[in-house]
Image (spheres, rainbow, N blue to C red):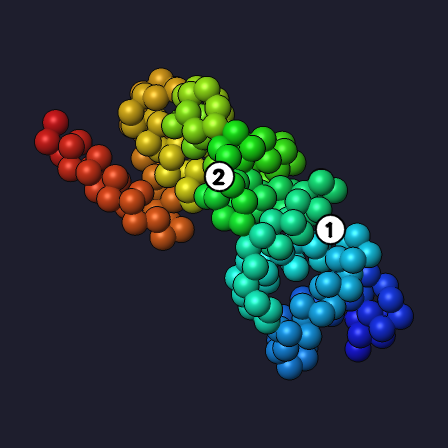
């Protein structure tokens, strides 16, 4: 296997990719504990993807003793290198107070870094922060802007929240037609709240 050969030669990318294959059981018997070992070798060489991967296993306790503080440490190392996924994961840790003291302002800062790179989940969560005023001054128009970015990338949560914005007229002109468009997109991805709102809108229209 090329990845194993590259990994044993000390190449960080090979170590990381071998870790991924072992964690998933892709082309090799699944071995999460060995995957963690290879992630750590690559992470120690500074590979951001491996640092994020190592953080995720510490956060879940898969193949290693669960350690949320260590997860945050590795998320931060990867986030500081600009990895959008790690920035989002670090933001979540701050948002929920997992492995680090809860700090909504820090969460927003990291959501923004990730969202600015086009990471859809971060865009959605940044929109929610603006909508609720958690960690930042409440701004419905900004919420809609970020929901729209996430929704355009197919994020069901963003599509649902954008539908809500159009239905209620929060941050954007009220438009039931647009609300239906976005609810439908979210519902097609299995979002039951969106499906419920679609049914409620249809029922109201039938009564008119």
Residue at 79% across, 77% down: 1
Residue 41 place in picture, x, y as percent: 78, 64
- Measure the C-alpha gap from mark 1 to mark 2: 24 Å
Q: Is residue 119 above or below residue 12?
A: above
Q: Residue furthest left?
A: 207
Residue 189 place in picture, x, y as percent: 40, 51
Identify the residue position indicated by label 1 in the image.
48
Residue at 79% across, 52% down: 46
- Please tell me which residue lies in front, 15 or 204: 15
Residue at 44% across, 38% down: 158
Instruction: From the image, state whether disc 1 or disc 2 is nearer to you.
Output: 2
Residue 121 place in picture, x, y as percent: 52, 42
Total numbered labels placed on residues in the image: 2
Compare marks 1 and 2 and give the one earlier in the sequence: 1
Picture quadrant of residue 178 = top left
- Please tell me which residue lies in front, 178 or 21: 21
Local packing at callout 2 (Cα closer than 10 Å; few below 14, some 14-19, many 20+) is some
Identify the residue position indicated by label 2 in the image.
102
Picture quadrant of residue 177 = top left
Residue 94 in sight here: yes
- Please tell me which residue lies in front, 35 or 102: 102
Residue 152 in sight here: no
| Disc marking residue 109 | none
Does dot 2 land on a helix, a strand or a loop?
loop
Q: Is residue 89 above or below residue 61?
A: above
Residue 104 place in picture, x, y as percent: 49, 33
Q: Is residue 141 above or below residue 149?
A: above
Local packing at callout 1 (Cα closer than 10 Å; few below 14, some 14-19, many 20+) is many
């Amino acid at each position: 296997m090329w990845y194993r050969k590259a990994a044993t030669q000390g190449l960080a990318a090979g170590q990381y990719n071998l870790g991924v294959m072992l964690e998933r059981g892709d082309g090799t018997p699944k071995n999460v504990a060995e995957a963690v070992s290879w992630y750590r070798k690559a992470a120690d060489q500074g590979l951001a993807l491996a640092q994020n991967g190592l953080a995720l296993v510490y956060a879940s306790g898969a193949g290693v003793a669960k350690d949320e503080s260590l997860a945050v440490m590795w998320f931060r190392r990867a986030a500081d290198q600009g990895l959008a996924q790690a920035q989002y994961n670090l933001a979540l840790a701050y948002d929920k107070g997992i492995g680090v003291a809860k700090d909504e302002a820090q969460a927003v800062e990291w959501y923004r870094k990730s969202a600015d790179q086009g990471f859809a989940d971060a865009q959605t969560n940044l929109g929610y922060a603006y909508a609720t005023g958690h960690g930042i001054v409440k701004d419905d128009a900004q919420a809609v802007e970020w929901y729209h970015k996430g929704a355009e990338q197919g994020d069901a949560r963003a599509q649902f929240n954008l539908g809500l914005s159009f239905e209620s007229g929060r941050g954007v002109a009220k438009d039931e037609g647009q609300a239906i468009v976005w609810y439908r997109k979210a519902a097609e991805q299995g979002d039951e709240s969106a499906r419920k709102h679609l049914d409620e809108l249809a029922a109201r229209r039938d009564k008119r």
